[in-house]
Image: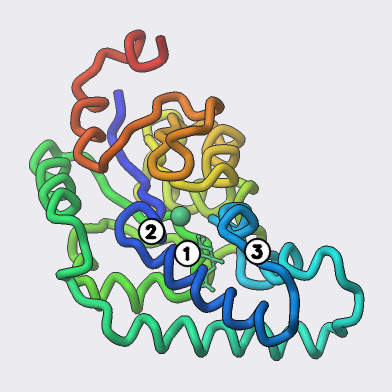
């Protein structure tokens, strides 16, 4: 029986994944490092500094101090891009689905590697839908480590096997599996065969809740 759903934020609840891409692209262009959407997909679910290390994987000329400066700069650009974010940037299916899940007494949490999660939830006015938020501020290891989801489940008072995780990141699906959660791939991860199920839109989470467990896993 699924009693809780843990949603990733960027790329699942709202398309801030595009803003992460734009911000990293600006940094990459400035320092003359190649960066495209394919590399960007590898950054989904990955912490800010781990993302920068992926972007710089073929260079060795940046010190830890340089890297910290670049990560801070990226975050400043990203936060400027977030300035104009409002609830109108959220697909109407999202609040509708969250409301319906709450009506069914399913507990809801955010499981995101981002340190900007609370800010984003406030801007899109969805904070009140979630019983718990586990984010980049309460973890020491980012996805594919399951820590962020294990914390979310703990905050909800549920065991991992009682929770589904909705993720657009391959690293997020790996994290969900490593933690013993039922994993639902969406967006980029709708092409990832390690996900227990793959869906096209958030509204389909409701259909999965309706399925008996053997069909869900079959
Ligand atoms: C999410 C995004 C990643 C991002 C990470 C850290 O997991 O999918 O692309 O790097 O959060 O975000 P932050 O807002 O803390 O830089
Ligand atoms: Mg994501």
Picture residue at 49% right of the left edge, 68% below the top: 114
Q: Is mark 1 within 8 Å of ligand 1?
A: yes
Q: Secondary structure at mark 3?
A: loop
Residue 140 falls in which quadrant of the image? bottom right
Instruction: Name above or below for residue 160 compared with residue 16.
Output: above
Instruction: Name above or below for residue 56 compared with residue 195.
Output: below
Check whether the beta carbons of the residues at disc 3 and disc 2 lie within 8 A of each other.
Answer: no
- Circle 1 residue: 135
Give the CA distance from mark 1 to mark 3. Answer: 10 Å
Pick whichever of labels 1 and 2 is earlier in the sequence. 2
Give the CA distance from mark 3 to mark 2. Answer: 18 Å
Residue 68 percent across, percent down from the top left: 72, 85
Check whether the beta carbons of the residues at disc 1 and disc 2 lie within 8 A of each other.
Answer: yes
Q: Secondary structure at mark 1?
A: loop
Is 35 displayed left or right of 107 in the figure?
right
- Of the 4 image quadrants, the one containing the N terminus is top left
Picture residue at 74% right of the left edge, 80% below the top: 32
Q: Residues within 10 Å of mark 1 (few under 14, many from 20)?
A: many
Residue 24 percent across, percent down from the top left: 58, 75
Q: Residues within 10 Å of mark 2 (few under 14, many from 20)?
A: many
- Circle 3 residue: 140
């Amino acid at each position: 029986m699924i009693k809780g759903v843990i949603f990733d934020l960027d790329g699942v609840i709202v398309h801030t994944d595009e803003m992460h891409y734009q911000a990293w692209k600006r940094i990459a262009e400035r320092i003359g490092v190649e960066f495209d959407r394919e590399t960007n997909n590898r950054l989904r679910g990955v912490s800010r500094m781990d993302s920068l290390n992926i972007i710089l994987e073929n260079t060795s000329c940046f010190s830890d101090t340089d890297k910290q400066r670049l990560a801070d700069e990226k975050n400043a650009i990203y936060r400027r891009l977030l300035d104009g974010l409002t609830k109108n940037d959220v697909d109407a299916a999202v609040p509708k689905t969250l409301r319906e899940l709450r009506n069914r007494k399913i507990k809801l949490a955010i499981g995101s590697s981002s340190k900007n999660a609370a800010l984003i939830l406030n801007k899109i006015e969805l904070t009140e839908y979630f019983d718990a938020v586990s984010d980049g501020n309460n973890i020491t290891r980012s996805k594919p480590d399951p820590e962020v989801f294990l914390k979310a489940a703990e905050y909800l008072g549920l065991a991992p096997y009682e929770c589904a995780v909705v993720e657009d990141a391959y690293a997020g699906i790996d994290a969900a599996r490593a933690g013993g959660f039922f994993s639902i791939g969406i967006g980029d991860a709708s092409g990832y065969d390690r996900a227990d199920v793959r869906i096209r839109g958030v509204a389909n989470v409701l259909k999965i809740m309706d399925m008996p467990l053997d069909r869900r896993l079959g």
